[in-house]
Amino acid sequence: MTPATLAAALPALGSVLYMPLVVCGQDLPQRSCKVLVATPELAPLLRVDWLLAASEIAPDGPREWIDGIDREGHPCLRLHLLPDTDYLGWDRLLALGKPISVPPPPHLRALDAHPLRFHRQRLYGLDLLRGETVAR
């Protein structure tokens, strides 16, 4: 998963719960890509090298999320499916990869969490990705 591929797919999701994670390899140099982020809170999106989709059935119902993993194997961010997330966009994003068997993801500490809707626009040959906070 390249940052450009991820930036192109995120707007189709509609609202998701965006959680930048503490564990991300901040010391890794960013790969060259043609994607810019509008705010520092979205910077972990530029470090994503692959995605890990997970789901669980909790006492209060099912939960689904995607972890963005950097090239060293550290989680950078988590996107939680919300009731108003576009399920078809979610499925299209997951269809970009191949299923593999991995151990369950660990509990991770988030720096922040808020519902976002992603927007992408072309700017001088680059993709500019920004997040719009969704009022609940």
Image: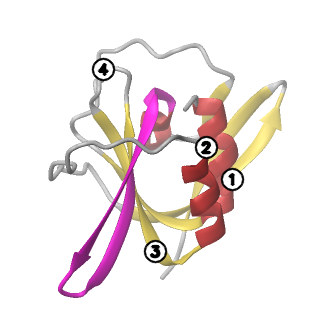
Q: CA distance from mark 2 to mark 4?
A: 21 Å
Task: Give the SS element for disc 1.
Answer: strand
**Position above or below: 121 against 48:** below
Disc nearer the start of the sequence (2/4) = 4
Picture disc at residue 109? none
Disc nearer the start of the sequence (3/2) = 3
Q: Residues within 10 Å of mark 3 (few under 14, many from 20)?
A: some
Which residue matches tag 4?
Answer: 72
Task: Give the SS element for disc 3.
Answer: strand
Residue at point 27% right, 30% down?
Answer: 74
- For the residues bearing labels 4 and 1, Cβ distance under 8 angstroms: no
Q: Position of residue 56 (x, y in %)?
A: 26, 69
Which residue matches tag 3?
Answer: 82
Magenta span dominant secondary structure = strand
Q: Nearer the viewer, residue 95 or 3?
A: 95
- Tell me the mark number nearer the camera, choosing from 4 and 1: 4
**Position above or below: 127 against 106:** above
Which three-letter amino acid code belongs to the residue tagged 2? Leu
- For the residues bearing labels 3 and 2, Cβ distance under 8 angstroms: no
- Tell me the mark number nearer the camera, choosing from 2 and 4: 2
Q: Position of residue 69 (x, y in %)?
A: 36, 35
Q: Quadrant of residue 15?
A: bottom right
For this orientation, the residue located farthest to the bottom is: 60
Disc nearer the start of the sequence (1/3) = 3
Picture disc at residue 119? 1
Residue at point 58% right, 31% down?
Answer: 3
Which three-letter amino acid code belongs to the residue tagged 1? His
Disc nearer the start of the sequence (4/1) = 4
- For the residues bearing labels 1 and 2, Cβ distance under 8 angstroms: no
Q: CA distance from mark 1 to mark 3?
A: 17 Å
Q: CA distance from mark 3 to mark 2?
A: 20 Å
Q: Please tell me whether residue 56 belongs to the stretch shown in magenta.
A: yes
